[in-house]
Amino acid sequence: MSQNARDQILGNIRRGLGRGELSQQAQTQLRERIGQHPRHTIPARGQLDAEGQVALFRSMAEEAAAELIDIDSLEKLPIAVADFLQQNQLKQLLRGSDAALEALDWGPLEGIKVESRPVQAGDPISLTLSFAGIAETGTLMLHSGPNSPTTMNFLTDIHLVALRQSQIVGFYEQAWQQLRETVGENWPRTVNMITGPSRSADIEQRLQMGAHGPKRLVIFMIND
Amino acid sequence: MEIKTPEFKASSRIALEDVSLQKALGNLRDGFPQKRAAAVARMPEFETLRDQARDLKNHTIEHLDYYLEQFETNVTKHGGQVHWARDGQQAREAILKICQSADAKTVTKGKSMVSEEIALNDYLEENGVQPVETDLGEYILQLREDHPSHIIAPAIHLNLDDVSDIFSKKHGTERTDDPAALMQEAREMLRKQFVGADVGITGANFCVAETGSTIIVTNEGNGDLTQTLPKVHVVITTIDKVVPTLEDMTLYLRLLARSATGQEFTVYNTLSTGPRREEDQDGPDEFHVVLLDNGRSEMVGTDFQDMLRCIRCSACMNHCPVYGSVGGHAYGWVYPGPMGSVLTPKLIGIDKAGHLPNASTFCGTCESVCPVRIPLPKMMRHWREREFEKHLSPTGFRFGLGVWSQFARRPKLYRWLAKLSSLSLKTLSGKKGRLKSLPLKNGWTAWRDLPAPQGGTFMDQWKKEQGNKQHKGGQQ
Ligand code: SF4
C-alpha cells in the first residue's frame, strides 16, 4: 500500500507539473542548493555589534517573560544557583552533566539533592546549558545529547539555563550554522528553540503563564 | 469530523443570533488583527520576507517530488520511517498499526488540523486506543465532544463560563471562574497522561528536506511533552509542508508567529529528527512520519496550486469579516475562513462546499495579510466559475445580500469591521501608497441603503486613513 501510495503521489505531482522525474542535472542543482542552504533577508535588528546583540537579547528575552540573572563567570554559577534555590526554598536540583558543568565546584549546593537524569513528573527544577542565544527574538537554542535530557527543558516547573554572553548570535541562521559545525554528522534528535516560559491564551484569548511547560524560565547570563 | 458544510447558509444565520458566540468572537476581533499589525510594524523587512516566502514556496512546489524524496531519505538516514498515505483511510490505518505494534492503550496528541482532517480520534477510539488531546484548547473541546473552530485557537468560540462548566463536570472539582486556576487544573490532569501514554502524536508546521526533520511550533509546551515522553513519536503531516533547508524553514518561522498571534516568536519551536540516539537518556525509541496527500497532489498544475503555499497561520480568518461574524463552525468542517473556502471544496468536493466560495465579500483583506501572498479571492472566484459550469451555483445566494444586511445592523460588529479595514489598508495600498481596490466595497454596496449604525462609516475611516497616509508621505 505504502509503496504504491508513494508512487501515486509522486506520479500525480509530476503529471501536474507536466514532466517526468527531474533530470540528473536538475537534481544536482537542487542538491547543491541544499548543500549551500542560502540565507534569505536577515532583519537589520539581527545584525548589531556584539554589545548591541547582548542588549537586544536581554530586552527581547525579558519581553517574552524570561528572567535574567547576571553573573561574572561560569565559576560563579553554582553559588548563583544555590542562592536561587534558597530563595525559592527548593531542596533538589536536576542538572545536565555536560563537561563544562561537571568541571565546576558544586560545593555551594551542599545539602541539596543534585542529580543528572531525565525528569520525572513532580521534579521541580532543572539546570541546563544553552547552545546559543539568538538576539533577534531573545531565543535560546538547546539540543538533545547524552548529557542533556530533553525532559529537563519541559517537564519541571522552573527551568534554569546558563548562557555565556559570547554564545549570543544576532540571528537564527548563525545558530544553525554553528550547530552544523559543532555536531557534524551527529545531528541531534531534537533542537529546542525556547523564547520565554510556557503560556496559553486558549481561554477567552486571555494570556496565562505556565501551561504545560515550565512556569518560569531563568537565564543565568555569564559575562565572559 | 462530520461534514456540515452544505448547511453553511443556515448555520451562518444561527451564528449571528448566538449571543454567547458573538461575545466569544469579540475576543478574536479585538485581539489578533491589532497584534499582528504591531508585530509587522516592528519588522521593516516584513514585506520583503513575504515576497521571498511566496517565491520559495513556488520553487518548492515546482520541485515537490524531489524535496519529498530528499525528506524521506533523510528521515530514514536518522532512523525514522516515512509512511505515505493517499487518503485519510490509509493514514488512519498506518497510525493504528503503529499504535498496535507498540501495544498502545493511550496516545497523547499535540494540536494537529491534519488529524482533524482524517478524523483520527474517532477511528482510534473505535479500535480500542484512547486519544488524549493535550493542547489546552483541544483538551477543552475533547471534554465537550466539540470541534475546533479556528486553526490555531481551537476553542475561540467558547467563553470562560463554558470552560468552568465542563471542567467542574468532568474533573469533579469545585467550579472556578479564574482562568489561571482552570489552566492549573488542566496542567495537573494532563501531567499523568503525558507520563502514561504509549504513543505521542503531533502535527508538523514544516518538514525539512535537508535534515529529515519536522518542526512544531507551540506556546504551551504540550507538543514537546507529547513527543518526548512516550516510546513512539508519530508525526501526521501533509505533502505541502516540506521546505528545502533549515534556512528556508527559518524564513517561514519569521513570518508565522507574527502573522498568527502577533508574537515575535512562538515560545517553543522544536525540531525533531529521528528517534533517540543510543547515548540519549530520554526521547522516543521510534520516529514515524505519516505523509498524507488527500487530494493535494492533484492541486499541482491547477488553478489551485497557489493554495499549497499556505502555512496555516490563520491571518486570513483573523481578518475576515465573514469569519469574524459567523465563526468557524458555520463553515461545517475542519478549515474555516478564506483558506477553508478555497481548500475545503478541494478536500470534500465542491458539491458539498459550494456555499463557501460565496462566503466572501471579496474585500481582499485575506490576501493582503497572507504571509505567502495567496490570491484567495481569485481562487474563490475560480471555484464559483466551476460551480457555474457544473450548474451547482446555489440559487441567488450572495453572502453580502443575506448575512451582510443582518451584519450591518450590529453596531459593534460594524465598528470592528471599520477598524479591521483601517488595519489592513496600509498593507493593501502597497508601496505606491495608493489603493488598488477599495476594500469591502461589495459589502459596502450591500448595506449602504441600510440605516447607518453608530460609530462612523467605513468611508470615514478610509478617508481618515488616506489623510494620514498622505501626511506620512505615502510611506508605510
Ligand atoms: S491562506 Fe495565507 S493567511 Fe490564510 S492561513 Fe494560509 S498562509 Fe495564513
Image: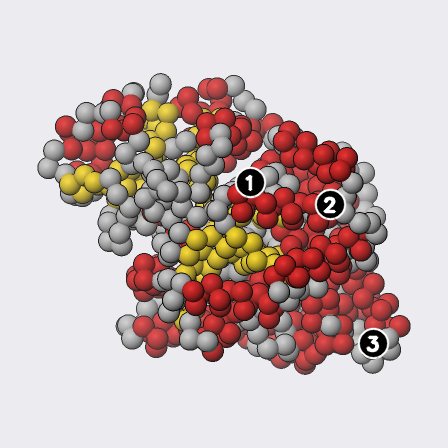
Which residue type carries mark 1? Answer: Thr
Please state the chain letter of the residue tagged with numbered disc 2 in the rendered image. Answer: B
Q: Is residue B134 shown above or below A119? A: below
Q: Which mark is residue B211?
A: 1
Q: Residue at x 77, y 69 (%)?
A: B358
Callout 1 environment at 10 Å: few (<14), some (14 to 19), or many (20+)?
A: many
Query: Can you see residue B287?
Result: yes
Please state the chain letter of the residue tagged with numbered disc 3 in the rendered image. Answer: B
Q: How is the image coloured?
A: secondary structure
Q: Residue under label 3, please give it.
A: B393
For this orientation, the residue located farthest to the right is B389
SS class, disc 3? loop
Q: Residue under label 2, please give it.
A: B63
Q: Which mark is residue B151?
A: none
Q: Is mark 2 within 8 Å of ligand 1?
A: no
SS class, disc 1? loop
Camera-nearest residue between A61 and A5: A5
Please state the chain letter of the residue tagged with numbered disc 1 in the rendered image. Answer: B
SS class, disc 2? loop
Which residue type carries mark 2? Answer: His
Q: Residue at x 72, y 34 (%)?
A: A28
Callout 2 environment at 10 Å: few (<14), some (14 to 19), or many (20+)?
A: many
Which residue type carries mark 3? Answer: Ser
Q: Earlier in the sequence, mark 1 or mark 3?
A: 1
Q: Residue at x 37, y 37 (%)?
A: A145
Q: Are marks 3 and 2 on the same chain?
A: yes
Q: CA distance from mark 1 to mark 3?
A: 46 Å
Q: Position of residue A55 (x, y in %)?
A: 45, 26
Q: Is mark 1 within 8 Å of ligand 1?
A: no
